[in-house]
Amino acid sequence: MKNRRVSLRIVVVVTCSLLSCTRNDPERFFPNIEISALTKYFPLEVGAQWIYKSSLKGLAHHPKRIHTILSLNELGYRVRCDSVWDEHGIAHNVLKEIVYYRPRKEGVEILDDSGRHEGFMLRTPYSVGTSWEMSIGADSLEMRYTILDTAAKAEVPGGTFDKCLLVECIPMGKLGALSPGDDSILRFAPHVGLVSYQNSKYVLSFYSIR
């Protein structure tokens, strides 16, 4: 009887492990895509988490943004994005948004919770001059992204990172004209991901990647 119980436990553990591996295997959903090269600057793994804190001083509340990869399915990596206002160690006004990051040969695509295409977080090739456009926000503001540097340095509370991608983000006017003074800079560290954005208004304070 004892041997049967041991055997049953082994079967259950092995079965659960196989199911878990299957669910977390990107090649099952995205064949013919070199995931490791595509996600060099934007790691995609179930369980990964990034926490960003505001670098602005003198605020009564200290906003944080927490991005967590929850699961993987045919749409892509399901990500929960939480916005938290922290006052004296107490979390207030937690806002939650669900998006998907989908690996494609052209780059890392962003989908909303219904699977609608929103744009690209990064576009290949990861080299100076690569440029793309994306609509963001409820007003569908058109933004132009351009890789300016592939060897930038970023110093944030979460660490010091070399050989980062430096990406400029500029809003586009109605006629395609650039809006001066409204540009933003994003930095992506190799094997870490996005480490600062909105001109370092939000900076990486913690990350966990398996």
Image: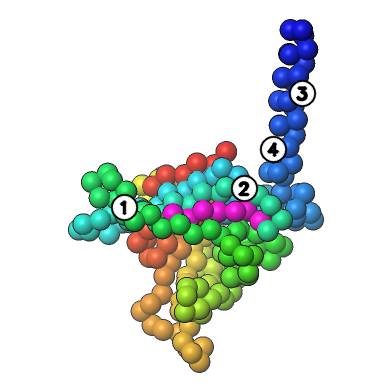
Kind of residue at badge 3: Val
Identify residue type, mark 4. Answer: Ser
Residue bearing the label numbered 1: 92
- The answer to whether residue 69 is above or below residue 7 is below
Q: Are marks 4 and 1 in contact (CB under 8 Å)?
A: no
Point 73% across, 13% down: residue: 6
Q: Is residue 52 left or right of residue 42?
A: left
Q: Earlier in the sequence, mark 4 or mark 1?
A: 4
Residue numbers of the magenta segment: 76-82
Question: Image quarter for residue 48?
Answer: top right
Q: Nearer the viewer, residue 7 or 161?
A: 7
Q: Is residue 170 above or below residue 26?
A: below
Classify 10 Å Cα crowding around label 3: few (below 14), some (14-19), many (20 and above): few
Q: Is residue 20 magenta?
A: no
Q: Position of residue 123 (x, y in %)?
A: 62, 66
State the SS at label 2: strand
The residue beneath circle 3 is: 11
Q: What's the CA distance linking mark 1 and mark 2?
A: 26 Å
At label 2, which amino acid type do we have? Answer: Ser
At horizontal 36% and vertical 79% (from top left) the residue drawn is 181
Question: Callout 1: 10 Å neighbours few (<14), some, many (20+)?
Answer: few
Q: How much space separates mark 2 and mark 3, taking CA atoms?
A: 24 Å
- Left of 30 or right of it: where is 167? left
Q: Are marks 4 and 2 in contact (CB under 8 Å)?
A: no
Sequence order check, earlier mark of 2 and 3 = 3
Label 2 Cα crowd, 10 Å radius (few <14 / some 14-19 / many 20+):
some
Q: Which residue is mark 4?
A: 20
